[in-house]
Amino acid sequence: MAKILVVDDEVKMVTLLKSALVVRGHEVQGVHGGKEALDLVSAEEFDVVLTDLRMEPVDGMAVVKGIKETSPDTEVIILTAFGDVDSAVSAMQAGACHYMTKPINFQNVAAMVEKFARAGELSRENRSLKLAVAVNNAGQEMVGQAQATEKLKDLIGRVAPSDATVLIRGESGVGKEVCARSVHNASKRAEGPFVAVNCAAIAETLLESELFGYRKGAFTGADTDRDGLFEAARGGTLFLDEIGEAPLAVQAKLLRVLEEKKINRVGDPRETDVDARIIAATNRPLEDSIAEKSFREDLYFRLLVFPLDVPPLRDRTDDVAPLVTHFMSSLGRKQKKLPAKTLARLRAYGWPGNIRELRNLIERAHILAGLQEITDEHIQLNVSPGTAKTLTEFDLTGDLSLDNHMRMLIETALDRAGGNKSQAAQMLGITRRTLYSRLKLLGMQDDSEE
């Protein structure tokens, strides 16, 4: 049994088609206008829609386009007079699966409906299977095996199938955009576009027109109408990075989009419906921005439907080795691992720049090593002044074991001891010999100390 919608402005035609299909065991509804059809399809799911082409004010072409936007798996069959065949072909190019000319044979119509109902059912099953596989593999773009990373992957898999707004929080360089793409790729919108915009990288005066588009003549230089990023992301996902940097005027319009799913282009009083999932990201606490009156509290709570916190690399050091392997592979290297001594150095490092810093470090080592294997001498940490962190500069949210924070703790102890290694060793609770061993392991020992 199929669920079918019949659309025709002739009441008699709707009645006859319903009777011919109901007698074959199908569930059939009928309406007498294009607007009524689109309203019904947005509220219910149909296998097949039979629609007349010539109707006023909303014709069959508009019905086809509207259905394909809101319910792409619903098959649409056009019913048209013989002289409108060219229009029917245009409707098929817009997404209709078939057209039939009037006067129609009701048995042929029923057979055609059943044929395309089966095709639609198969299409839905395939889509559901693909979505199930995507959800099962959710977060695979997030390279790593640390407990915190696995927990994040699990949360991505839970939120991805829904259309819920997501707020991704984390320091710069932790992989917030990768996380956003993971949500998109495991969602039912995966075949749609993923559009990313950095709110901090666009001037305040331009951000509104970039997001919402503008109408010709809205401002100097607006020579033509232009779609914004919300319209570019139709059917997909819009990723708003650095959302805390958006000006208050833009925040007000974003709040309206989240509440009503409508936008106004700059200079255009007409409203436009939008169909894009919103994922936002921030690298600083929005609560602080709310306290400073630079971020709207109501927008914050509209974004905070499902938060995803991406932990810093220093709190998931088990991810260092797989990330190194991933970056070396992406550079085309056959070498997949670094020496154990080198990996120990990398795990002990504080990673203020997080994964982005690690990626840059591996790329730099790749260039330095050339055709040779990457060794410890090619791994250059703290290449920029002021990169190293001390305990007073760094927020230690994980444990304080020497294994996890070896380099940082040793540097802090030596700094406080004025370079005296005996005193530094006492501060660390280890022997002077052990300190020398750790210094050698981390490559922090001068040649004169050999």
Image (tube, rainbow, N blue to C red):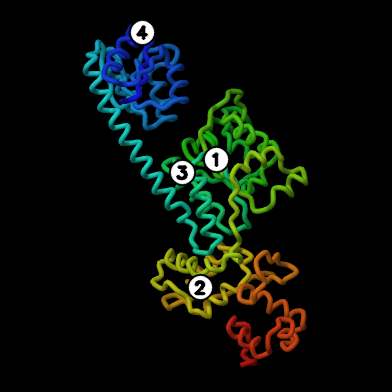
Residues 211 and 96: in front is 96
Residues 48 and 299: in front is 48
- Element class at badge 2: helix
- Element class at badge 1: loop
Q: Earlier in the sequence, mark 1 or mark 3?
A: 1
Residue at 62% across / 41% down in the picture? 303
Q: Earlier in the sequence, mark 4 or mark 3?
A: 4
Residue 332 vertical placement versus 82 (above, below): below
Q: Residues within 10 Å of mark 4 (few under 14, many from 20)?
A: few
Residue 333, quarter of picture: bottom left
- The residue that mark 4 highlights is 10
- The residue that mark 1 highlights is 164
3D distance between C-alphas at marks 3 and 2: 37 Å
- The residue that mark 3 highlights is 187
Quadrant where the C terminus is found in the figure? bottom right
Amino acid type at image mark 3: Ser
Disc 1, disc 3: CB below 8 Å?
no
Side of 193 relative to 169 (left or right): left
Amino acid type at image mark 1: Ala
